[in-house]
Amino acid sequence: MSDTVALSRLARQPLCRPEVSGLPRYNAGLSEDEVQRRYSLKNIVKLGSNENPYGPSTQVKAVWDNLASRLGRYPDAAAMTLRSDIAKVCGIELDRILVGNGSEQIIRMIAEAYLSPQDRVVTVKPAFGLHEICPRMMGAVVDAVPITEQATFDCAALQQAVQSPTKVLMFANPSNPVGCMMKGDELQELIASCPPDALIVVDEAYREYAEQDPDYPDARTILEKQERPWIILRTFSKAYGLAALRIGYALTSSGEISAALDTVRDPFNTNMPAQVAACAVLADVAYMKDCVRKTVAERERVVQFLITKGLFVAPTWTNFVFVRTSMKADKLAVALLEQGIIIKPWKEAGFENWIRISIGLPEENNIVMNALADLVL
Ligand SMILES: *Cc1c(COP(=O)(O)O)cnc(C)c1O
């Protein structure tokens, strides 16, 4: 082989690791600005990212008033004040709490700290994108167990799946994008089926919307009874209304797990304004609960409308609905975008007709319901 041929072959090889070149991109959705620009629109209804449409507690504004003068200093790398507040609210030791630049970052840290090539990770399908992307980035093999025909967790199949060698079991309860909820006895049985050294990660991004239901299990109560490694993920991005600030946290089974995650953590991973705001919203749980109450009431109104129109809506314990439509989801999403409505089309094989709609303000929900009635009903 001549040198030129060898060189041109080499040039066609991606420089990055093969685990990275084959990965799908996380679908972060479109911003309001981008949709305004692209379609020359003024008003946008953003129902694609499961945010709290009411925003955060006004306490945030109060504590942020004098922040500008403090921006010259690095944030507290250990986020002591925020972690102490979380410790108090959750009743857990400080060394079992870790904060992240969004819980997304903690998902990545879990993959970096625990996963080697060929390790097996069990999750569900469809899953929150990063539950699959981050493990695969490390070379792990992801086994995603499909939901049932009724759009609920397939607990029997999950129990079966974790009986093969499993390094990490990771899923969200309630689920994103489906919205379904795993009950306490089901969660308990699933955990019992895992190998004793499997790391169990329960992502509770939407727990605030589910916890009114007596059947919704507090995963920690169940996990605390086990001599197992586990991590629970929580976020300030959803019910607490701080999505822009990127802040979330993990509770862990032991200081040992926290220490492993802390080793792969960027030193100043969460910024000072976010730490301050998170403390403020934690101190105003009543406001958050009021937002949840309004959102759940709106959700029931949207669900009823869609069901009355003959669409299949997955049972949901969250601030969004996952809906099967008669149209291809990405076509439908573009038709809605042209009207300034952002929703999330599911692009995964087997779910190409499903869309996820976040619950917004009542008037926003009316707009999306009317638009859907025109397009697919
Ligand atoms: C939104 C979401 C997150 C990300 O939360 P951030 O704290 O904003 O990074 C994590 N997990 C699930 C299941 C989510 O839906």
Image (cartoon, grey):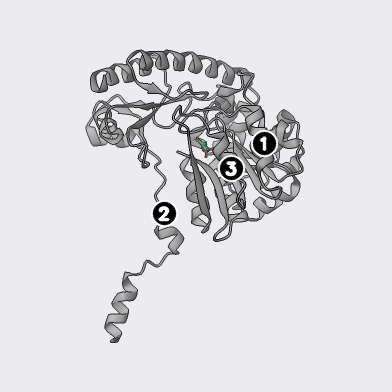
Secondary structure type for disc 2: loop
Q: Does residue 306 lie above or below 105 as drawn?
A: above
Query: Badge 1, how many Cα within 10 Å: few under 14, some, many 20+?
Result: many
Return the x and y of residue 316 as percentages of the image width and height: 49, 23
Q: Amino acid at mark 3?
A: Gln
Residue at (48%, 21%) from the top-left corner?
A: 54
Residue at mark 1 to residue at mark 2: CA–CA distance: 34 Å
Dot 3 corresponds to which residue? Answer: 160
Return the x and y of residue 307 as percentages of the image width and height: 38, 16
Q: Nearer the viewer, residue 42 or 356?
A: 356
Mark 2 or mark 3: which is in front? Answer: 3
Return the x and y of residue 290 as percentages of the image width and height: 56, 15
Earlier sequence position, callout 1 versus callout 3:
1
Return the x and y of residue 173 as percentages of the image width and height: 57, 32
Left/right placement of residue 186 relative to residue 128 reads right
Dot 2 corresponds to which residue? Answer: 23
Residue at (54%, 19%) from the top-left corner?
A: 292
